[in-house]
Image: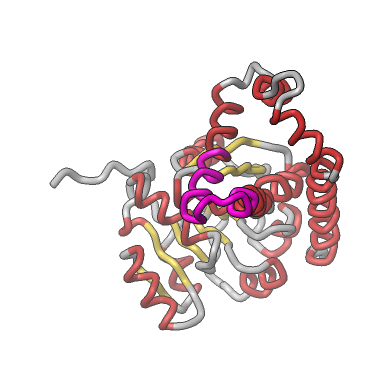
Amino acid sequence: MAEQVSLLPKHTRIGFIGYGNIVVPLVSGWLRTKSVRPDQIMGSCLTESTAARIRDKHGIEMTLKTNDLVEACNIVFVAVKPHLVQSVVESIPNWNASRHLVVSLAACVTLSSYSYILPEGTRVIRLALNTGSGVLACASAMAVGVNVLPIESSLIQGLMNSVGTCLPVEEKHIDTVSSVCGCGIAYMFLVAEALADGGLEAGLKKDVVIKLAAQTLIAAGKNILEYQDTHVSKLKDNVCSPGGITIKGLHSLERNGVRNAFLDAVEIGVKTHAEYAHKFEVKK
């Protein structure tokens, strides 16, 4: 059997402190694409039952001791809830600034905060993503800390591109990214559900209409990505004919405030991220 081709350099191992809903699809995507081998991944969690479930699902090494994970891995993803980041990170004595690259999945925890809770000079990347990595359609962006080497940022971006699309952004935009794509995938589920409910009300069977709604979202996304030189409003207009059904439907959506509802949802997300960032900011 041919050996899996991994994107990781030799002797590099990735560890996840926390193994929740954002990590499971990410690792699933990496294993699916063979970007990372199971033996190159380690995770930590709070209970043996959770560890056993993840071992069965992903075939990776799990531990209940974060110290062991940090000792074994040189790329460490911090994937705990934002309010737990400081206590968890500071409880680990064996951080090594020259050895560890830290990738934060914790929303609202700034690079500046990490500079206070990790050894001086530790390289840190903030990563905002959604749950699309398991189906190789993840939208993500990364903000790179001052000490991170270009080869390291390229590695993380390459890993994320293997399960979707990852773009570099300034840290001041990372909360907006979270609001657009991290929260946005839930908004798209709502759109699919509402579209399917309309078809259901009109008489289509549920298993048929939900597939058609989902495929329609895929078609819209692919058109936007394939024809990036064409403004999305033009793609929308191309579907409409004078006095036709589509323009009448769009008129109804605009009259009912759909556009403004999405604008408000992103705005609320950005404001809430900023509030939480202030709440969880570490100062010394």
**In the figure, is residue 124 to the left or right of 244?**
left
Above or below residue 165? Residue 193 is below
Whether residue 127 is visible here, answered yes or no, is no
Q: Quadrant of residue 284?
A: bottom right
Residue furthest left as drawn = 1
Identify whether 45 is placed above or below 35: below
Q: Position of residue 241 (x, y in %)?
A: 70, 20
Q: Is residue 85 magenta?
A: no
The location of residue 259, given as percent across then percent down, is 81, 40
Residue at left 56%, top 72%?
93
Q: Residue furthest front?
A: 203
* Residue drawn where x is 35% and y is 52% of the image: 31
Confirm whether the magenta stretch covers residue 211: yes
Q: Nearer the viewer, residue 255 or 36?
A: 255
What's the residue at 54%, 23% (across, down)? 226
Q: Of 179 and 256, which appears nearest the observer?
A: 256
Foreground: 71 or 77? 77
- Residue 198: horizontal and vertical position, in percent? 65, 50
Q: Which residues are the magenta region?
A: 198-216
Q: Residue at x 70, y 30 (%)?
A: 245
Above or below, 72 against 141 in this view is below
Q: What is the number of callouts on the image?
A: 0
| Left or right of 267 in this view: 82 | left
Q: Assign the magenta stretch its main secondary structure.
A: helix
Res. 39 in view: yes
Relative image position of residue 106 (x, y in whole percent) = 65, 60
The residue nearer to you, when weighing 94 against 35, is 35
Residue 79 sits in quarter:
bottom right
Q: Is residue 103 left or right of residue 16?
A: right
How is this picture coloured?
Answer: secondary structure
